[in-house]
Amino acid sequence: MDHKDKHLFDNPQNVKRILRILYLICALLFAMDFILPRHTTHSWENLWGFYAIYGFVGCVLLVLIAKWMRKFLMRPENYYDSHELQGIESDNNVDA
Amino acid sequence: MWMLELPPFVPFYVGALLALITRGSLRSLLMIAVPILGVIQLWTVPEGVHLRLAFLDFELIPYRADKLSFMFGYVFHIAAFISIIYALHVRDTVEKIAGMLYVGSALGAVFAGDLLTLFVFWELLAFSSVFLIWTRRTPRAYVAGMRYLVIQALSGVILLVGALFYADHNGTLAFEQIGLNGIHGWLIFIAVGIKCAFPMLHNWLTDAYPEATPTGTVFLSAFTTKVAVYMLARAYPGTELLVYIGAAMTCFPIFFAVIENDLRRVLAYSMINQIGFMVCGIGIGTALAINGAVSHAFNDIIFKGLLFMSMGAVLHMSGRINGSDLGGLYKSMPKTTALCIVGAASISAFPLFSGFVSKSMIMSAALENGYDWIWLVLLFASAGVFHHAGIKIPYFAFFAHDAGIRTSDPPKNMLTAMFIAAVLCVTIGVYPAVLYALLPFDTGYIPYDATHVLAQTQLLFFAALAFAWLNLQRLYPPELHSVNLDVDWLYRRAVPTTLRACFGFVRNSKITLQQFLRGNLDKFLLSASRHEAANWMLRPGLTGSMVMWVVVSLAVCLLLGFV
C-alpha cells in the first residue's frame, strides 16, 4: 500500500530542507546572544555563544568517546547467552 | 470518616484480588477505577499520621502523609492510571496482578512512617515487580529476572540490617532524616543506593527493564527508582556526597546509551541519567534544589513512561526493538512517532515541555550554591540526554533508513495512554504552576525568563547540529547487533568463570589426591605386614606422628568431601 516517494522523507529534498531550517535556527540563536540583554549568574555564561559551543563540542566529544569505547566494550550479541541460557532454552521451548 | 484511615496501598491490593477473580471488560473497568478512586481518596486526606500500631517496644506508622509523600502519591496514581490503560489489551492475569501489587507496594513505601513498614513494602516491590519481567516468558527474561530479584532482595536485607542498627541507636523506628552518621546511616544509604542505581550498583536496571514485557517495562520505569529517590529526599537531603554521585550518574550512562542497540536499554541508561539529576538536587539540599529533584521525579515518571510506551508500542507492533533492525516507522506509525517526539522533547527539557521546568531548578541551585564544575557536568549531561534520548530514540526507530517494516499504530488503549502522558508533559511545561503547587517548598521560582530559555534552546539546537554534522560526516557510530560490557560483566561473567575454574581445580585435586592416597595406603599396608618382624614401626614417636598424619589426611578428605 506504500508507494515509493509517497512519504515525507523519501524525497531527499525534504531532508535537505529540514537541515537548512536547522542551520538557520542555529544561526539565529547564536545571533540572539548579541542582541538579547542577558542576566547571568556565572562568568562563563557571559562568553558569547557559550551554550551553543558547549552543546556542540560536548556532543561531538560524547559520540567520539562512546565510539572509541566500543573498541573494548563491544561483544557479540550472544556473549552472555551462551553461558547463561544453557539448559534453560530447551525447557522454555517445551513450554512454548 | 473511615475512608481517611484507609492507606493508599489498600485499593491497589484489593484491585489485585479483583484482577484474579474477574475477566474481560469488567476487569478492565475495575482496573481503571482503582487509581481514580485512589487519587480521589488521597485528595481528601489531610497531612499527618493516620495510622499507628504497636509492635514489641516500637511504634509502627504504616500511614503517614506529608507534602513529600503526597507528591509521590499523586504521581504514582497518575503513572498507575496511564500504565493500566496502556496494558488493557494484555490478558495475562499474572501480569495484571503483579502490576497492581507493585503499584500498591510503591504507595505503601512512600506513605510508610517507619523503617519496618518501609522494609516490608520495599521487599514486596521486588517480589511483585519481578513477575512483570518473567511474564515476558523468554529464557533471557527468566535469568535477568533472577538477577533482578537477587539484587533487589539483597537491597532489602541491607535496609533491614540498617533499620535494626538505627533502632538500636535511636530507640525508635520512625523514618525521618537519617544522614550519614554511623553504620545505620551508611547501610540504609547503600540499600537505597542499590534501588536508586548508584554508579557500580546500576546494572540491575539496564539488565532487567529491557527484558520485561512491553507493558511491564512501563510499570517498572515509574516506581522502584522513584521510591528510592523519595527515600533519599527524606533521609539524606543536603548530603554532599550525593552531589558527586548524582553528577556521575548523569554522565557515565550517556556514553553507554550512545552505543547501545536495544532502544529500551538506551532508555534504561537514560533513566539513570535522569535520576542523577534528582540525586544531585537532593545532595545540594536547598529548598530550590529539593523542589527541583522532586518535581523532576514527578515529570520523569510521565515522560520516561511515555518514551517506554512508545518503544513498547514499536516492540508490540513490529516485534523488534534493536535500533539496527528498525527505521522508517514514521510511515506506518505516525501517531506513535508524534507522541514519542513529545516525550523526547520533554526529557530533553525543551522550553514548553515538562523537563524544562523541573531540571532548570536543579541547574540553578547548583550554580547558586557554588558547584561550578558540577553545573558544567550537568550541562554536558543535558546536552547528552538530548543526544541519545531526544534524537537517537525517535531517529533510529521512526526515521533513519527504512527497514521495510509495514505495520500500523498500536491498539487504541496504548495510544490513549501515550496521549494522556503527552498532554501532561505539555501541560506541565506550559503551565508549571500546577506542578509547583504540589511542591514541598514555596520558592517562587520562575522557569521562563528570556536568558534561561535562550541558553537552553541554544544548548539543545547545537546538540542537534552536532548530531546532524556527525551523521553527515559518517562519524556517528552505526547501530550494531552487540552487547556492551558494563559492571554486570563482573557478576555475569568474571565471577562465574573464576568460580567455575576454582571448583574445577578443587575437584580435580580431590580426585588426584584420593587416587594417590588410596594407592599408597595399599602399598603401605602391604609393607607394614611384611616388615612386622622388623618391629621398627612400633617405636612410640613414630606411632604418634603416624596418628597425627592419619588425622590430617582424614581431615583433608573430609574438607574435600564438602567441596
Image: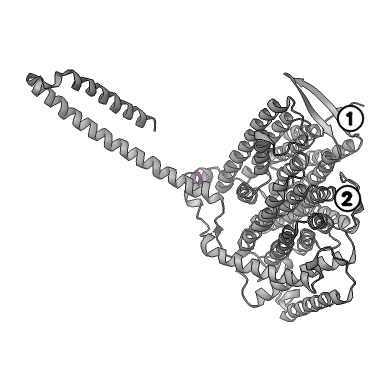
Element on which disc 1 rests: helix
**Whether residue B463 can be seen here:** no
Q: Amino acid at mark 2?
A: Leu
Please tell me which of labels 1 and 2 falls first in the chain. 1
Q: Which mark is residue B435?
A: 2
Chain on which label 1 sits: B
**Whether residue B3 can be seen here:** yes
Would you say the residues marked 1 and 2 are in contact, meaning their CB atoms lie under 8 Å apart?
no
Report x, y in % for residue A49. Answer: 79, 73
Q: Residue at x 67, y 53 (%)?
A: B249
Q: Which mark is residue B4?
A: 1
Report x, y in % for residue B244. Answer: 69, 52
Label 2: few (<14), some (14–19) or many (≥20) C-alpha neighbours in 10 Å: some
Q: Residue at x 73, y 59 (%)?
A: B378
Q: Is residue B446 above or below residue B89?
A: below
Q: Write the start and end of the magenta stretch as one range.
A: A85-89
Say whether residue B370 is left or right of residue B139: right
State the residue lying farthest toward the left: B533
Task: Give B180 or B445, whichever is nearer the viewer.
Answer: B180
Element on which disc 2 rests: helix
* Circles 1 and 2 on the same subunit: yes
